[in-house]
Amino acid sequence: MPVDSFKFLPRLIATFYQMLETPPQRPLPWTPLSKPLSDCTVGLVTSAGLYHAGVEPPFDTARERQEPTWGDPTYRTIPAGIRQAEIGVSHLHLNTAPLRADFNIALPIRRLRELASAGRIGGVAERHFAFMGYQGFPPDAAAWRDRYGPEVAAHFKAQGVDCVLLTPT
Amino acid sequence: MPVLARTLEAHGLPTVLITMMPFWAEKIGAPRALAVEFPFGHPLGQPHNVAQQMGVLAEALAVLATAVAPGAIVHSDAIWPEPVEEAIKAWQPPAPSPIIAHLAPQFRQMLRDRRQK
């Protein structure tokens, strides 16, 4: 059965999505996986609004409250060894309690480490990256595309990352 | 988020996106995606449900390893283990987000207009 994108959405939010007019972007870029997964170092990017509490600031939800059509486009760095207690979540569009209970539901660092221990992937990046998914209304992903996305790509390449798993929330 | 996937991919990194919104991933285009019928905020599943998280992760990595052309979307058979009505309530923030609060009157009018058509 195909996945129903609207199954868990209240009507107002479904309407919000149906109102969005974003032209399709084609052609799609494509980089083939150059080696088996068992040799690949895997990096993670989430848009769950996670941040390393006490080390980096939360996302700017104060400005978003003042200016509801704006969303913070910046990103935060999450070291692979982070503990649950060090994870902050700033996201006004989600119940953040499940992420505060187990960040692996959006940033599966522990699961990746288990796969690496089992030899199914080559390794886990030392640093992962978190964005906050709400990019304004109408959505404007230009800063992600032109500035922050390329910065994250450069950080991953500098760490020898071979492929990236992205988890929107 | 498909925008970030495309950006990383264009910079030479193979990507796979785990999405609850294949409608959106398909519309705007992601190089590779695994679609899961899970509530927002839960791309890998429920807190502390290690088997479920690992199952989704393995499926996503399989898409990464096997997709042969851009735009690949694989639909997972994983089933959300909680009743739908509860899950709809559970994922939402305690108060409506600023934009939803801001747009709600306009949306309600649209829904009324649609019913009248």
Image (spheres, rainbow, N blue to C red):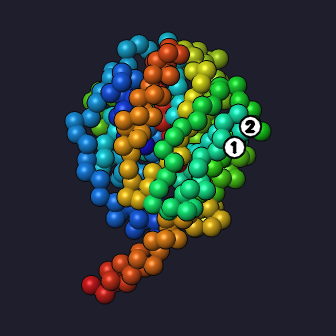
What residue appears at the point 41 percent right and 75 percent down from the top-left corner?
Answer: B107
What residue appears at the point 45 percent right and 60 percent down from the top-left corner?
Answer: A69
Residue in the foreground of this view, choosing between A143 and A94 = A143
User: Which residue position is annotated with label 1?
Assistant: A88
Question: A15 left or right of A40?
Answer: left
How much space separates mark 1 and mark 2, taking CA atoms?
Answer: 9 Å
Mark 1 or mark 2: whose residue is earlier in sequence: 2
Residue type of the residue flagged with mark 1 = Gly
Inspect this view and state whether residue A50 appears. Answer: yes
Residue type of the residue flagged with mark 2 = Gly
Numbered tag placed on residue B67 in the rendering: none
Q: Chain of mark 2?
A: A
Residue B38, how many percent across, how many down?
52, 52
Q: Residue furthest bottom?
A: B116
User: Which residue position is annotated with label 2?
Assistant: A54
Residue B39, how many percent across, how many down?
54, 55
